[in-house]
Image (tube, grey):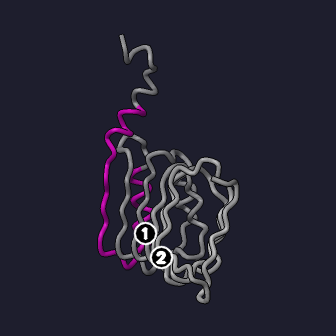
Amino acid sequence: VPNSMNISSSSGSSLKLKCLELVRCWELRNLEICAENLVSFKYCGPHLDTEFRSVPRLVEAEFGGSYVEFTRESFLSQIKVLKLDITQNVPQVVYWLCQLPELKNLKHLELVTCMEDGITLSTCALLLKASPSLWRFTLKVNMFASLAKKCSRIGPSYLFS
């Protein structure tokens, strides 16, 4: 995967990109998207400098990994379905969600979290407050991530004794 990626599909081109998923692209640092027909976008990975220049049909977005800066994206007000996996985002997630604009069109919010991370209630409150048109809220607890965090605090020597 290159360090920088430019995805462009104008109305005159043959590329009619509707769905884009970028998962575990560890080397990717910059992403520029101009896709008139893009409906769904998923990104799971590290920090990424992004620019969404023209995505008028984008209504579904999913973010995970250590990337939480999506809160500054201009398309957020048009999103109808938002899925967030915040199992790796402690403690930055609350800081970034405090800057979240109103999600006036959001109908379905799905949050994947670890209950023991101490931010679940704050995160839920911030997201619900920013979503006045919400119809459906789904909270998923990733027990494996919770267990992995506990084990990392104990240390590997205790795991195999």
> Over which residues does the magenta segment extend?
120-149
Which residue has dot 2 on it?
18
> Within 10 Å of the Cα at label 1, are there few (<14), some (14-19), or many (20+) other Cα atoms?
few
> Within 10 Å of the Cα at label 2, are there few (<14), some (14-19), or many (20+) other Cα atoms?
some
Give the residue at the far top of this rendering. 161
- Is 2 located above or below residue 90 in the figure? below
Give the residue at the far bottom of this rendering. 12
Sequence-first disc among 2 and 1: 2
Give the residue at the far front of this rendering. 14
Q: Nearer the viewer, residue 67 or 44?
A: 44
- Is 64 located above or below residue 61 in the figure? above
Circle number at residue 129? 1
The residue lying at 32 percent from left, 48 percent from top is 141
The answer, for residue 77, to whether it is visible in the render is no
Asked if the stretch drawn in magenta spans residue 130, the answer is yes
Residue 119 placed where, x, y %? 44, 48
The residue lying at 42 percent from left, 42 percent from top is 117
